Amino acid sequence: MENNTFTCEKIKNVLIISKKCGKDMNKYDASDIEVLEGLEPVRLRPGMYIGGTDEKAWHHLPVEIMDNSIDEAVAGFAKKIIVNLIDSKTIEITDDGRGIPVDEHPKYPGKSALEVILTTLHSGGKFNNNVYKTSGGLHGVGSAVVNALSSEMIVTVSRDGFEWTQTFSRGKTTSPITKGAATRAHGTRVRFTLDDKIFGENAVFKPVKIYRMARAKSFLSRGVKIEWHCNPALLTEDMNIDADKVFYYPNGVADFVAEKTDSKPRILPKIFSGAIDFPDDSGRVEWALTVLTDENGAASDDGFFASYCNTIATIDGGTHETGFKSAITKGLKAYGEKINNKSAASIISEDVFDSVAAIVSVFYKTPQFLGQTKEKLSNPEIARYTENALRDPWEMFLASDPKTANALLEFVINLANARIKTKQVKDVARKTPTKRIRMPSKLADCSKHGVDGTELFIVEGESAGGTAKQARDRATQAIMPLRGKVLNVLSNSDERFSANKELNDLIDIIGAGTMKDWDESKLRYEKIIVMTDADVDGSHIASLLMAFFYQYMPQLIYGGHLYLSCPPLYKLTYGTESIYVDTDEELENLKSGKYKNKKVEISRFKGLGEMMPNQLKETTMSPKTRRLIRVDLPPKTEEGLEDTEKTKTLVYDLMGKKPEFRFKFITEHAQFVKDLFV
């Protein structure tokens, strides 16, 4: 029976509970209004403040604390920041800035400013432009939210000639502020521990993620030293990071791009970089760009493009990216027009940025973001400011070295021609009597012409889709990310299916039509691979997709084109040895056998998006090392008609509109279930 079935028995239980509580369910008065105080709203609804309670969310907590230190550095009051990963759940961040004020707050008698900042939402110095011209923290919620979601937080401030310490837990003060030893130092040290009650016992900091965060903050804050320290017990050889490291980039993003590309072939011998203030002293933009090639002079797969605002990574882009790309693209087209190269008119931004290694970083007084975790910048004026700031420097850069500019222009024109040719081929292949079908923008297509050896990965979620795009073989592997669970076509009407964009996009992408209109000669990929998480939700999504293909493209299954991927569930690390494990049974066998009485680190993959691209490639995507399950159907012959009907009945019973058929199947087959994981 489905969990959402609301039976008479349940109604009876609700009425009994209501009666016992002495509350008339129909009555609604002031006593029903609950007022959450202090930081209780954060603990009750953490997703409103940090986007959820998953790995991405808890790794956002040290970012909030570090952004405060970076703001001190950007404002000119700090020169060094120390990030110390003490254990898998505890991190400490120290700066040599002014130190959080510890004197009594005028609006809160008896409370220090430190206590107010750590226990009150929308408090801090970020609202006052006299304190910070630009800042990563905008809403005054960062430190308080971290406090609310930590089992323990210890803050030590050095200022006014003394050390001051105060402790907190789960958003509440656990000790008064204490005046300690005399000191000539200044700055703030914050140590906090993840709260298992919020994030679960499996919540741990990943050293690689914190390491990369510290490195990024360093090159985005030119001239600021960031020391990285990590408990060596947390590191494994495959992480390829040091336990102790000092990041220092005196020229900011230009130094970082140079470091990442100096050993790679590139068209621009000199990196195009600079920094320019915006109008009215509202902020500035810093940038660095070069264009990479492979050893044969073609576009490189090693490129990257990252954007930031006030040192916050804007992974979904925004208006600063729009302005930056527009300036570079328009400038290159203008140069082509100047030298009378008519082919330059066909260039678009996609061609220019296909093979770049670039960073654009803006600092702005009043940035506007989409979402509390600040993943997309939305100020419309920043697009104009950024484009105007880069226009003249970029045109001068091209004009100063015509040989390099001509080589770059020809390189980009070749990419534009390849794009146009590919589009023409696809348009012809997909042409119908009434329209040409455009491929969905979310599809990252492969570059190989022809079907042989090509694969389409249908991936669960945008995050996993992003990782898969980095892990794939661009020549033969295409990626199509899905948003959540797809429509169950067997329990919904044809009208709902016709209105479902994601499933109709899949039909267009696969290219061979459906049912009676099926034409295998138009199939665009040799293998269609469903790649979902190794959990119950992932299995459900895979089942929904198989039902869709069974209903509308059974020929895909009969032809042996449909597969399921087999991502691992665990990673076991013992010393320098790491292995991947697919099932709980296999895990238990290893723990009681090969690794019995040994200290083994066990990491559970909650989702494909948690894997590093190299891990996803090695375990799930590379034909050399992965495992696939081919989806088969009984043969569609006269002799097999009975089996075919049985299959159809089973599929419709399990996936159709009537839950009683599922209930019957479960009760009849429960005795055969070996393990049941909830």
Image (tube, helix red, strand yellow):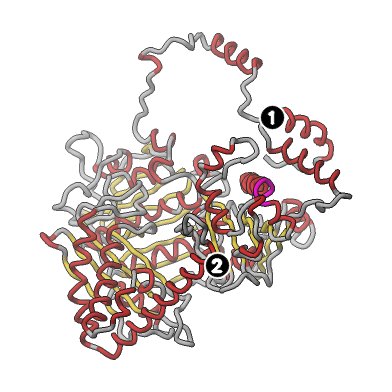
**Does residue 48 appear in this view?**
yes
The image quadrant where one finds the N terminus is: top right
Q: Is residue 245 above or below residue 598?
A: below
Residue 503 position within the rendered picture, expressed as x and y whole percent measured from the top left: 56, 48
Q: Is residue 277 left or right of residue 314?
A: left
Q: Nearer the viewer, residue 121 or 673?
A: 673
Residue 251 position within the rendered picture, expressed as x and y whole percent measured from the top left: 27, 76
Residue 643 position within the rendered picture, expressed as x and y whole percent measured from the top left: 84, 45
| Residue shown at 82% from the left, 41% from the top | 646
Residue 92 position within the rendered picture, expressed as x and y whole percent measured from the top left: 41, 56
Q: Nearer the viewer, residue 297 or 100?
A: 297
Quadrant in the rendering for residue 419: bottom left
Magenta stretch: give its range: 549-553
Quadrant in the rendering for residue 171: top left
Disc 1/disc 2 C-alpha distance (Å): 41 Å
Secondary-structure class at tag 1:
loop
| Residue shown at 66% from the left, 50% from the top | 515
| Residue shown at 28% from the left, 55% from the top | 136
**Does residue 534 appear in this view?**
no
Q: Residue furthest left?
A: 280
- Indicate the amino acid at tag 2: Ala
Q: Is residue 396 above or below residue 523?
A: below
Q: Is residue 301 left or right of residue 452?
A: left
Marker disc for residue 658: 1
Q: Is residue 271 magenta?
A: no
For the stretch drawn in magenta, the main secondary structure is helix
Q: Residue furthest front?
A: 433
Q: Is residue 301 left or right of residue 510?
A: left
- Indicate the amino acid at tag 1: Lys
Residue denoted by label 2: 471
Quadrant in the rendering for residue 5: top right
| Residue shown at 70% from the left, 42% from the top | 677
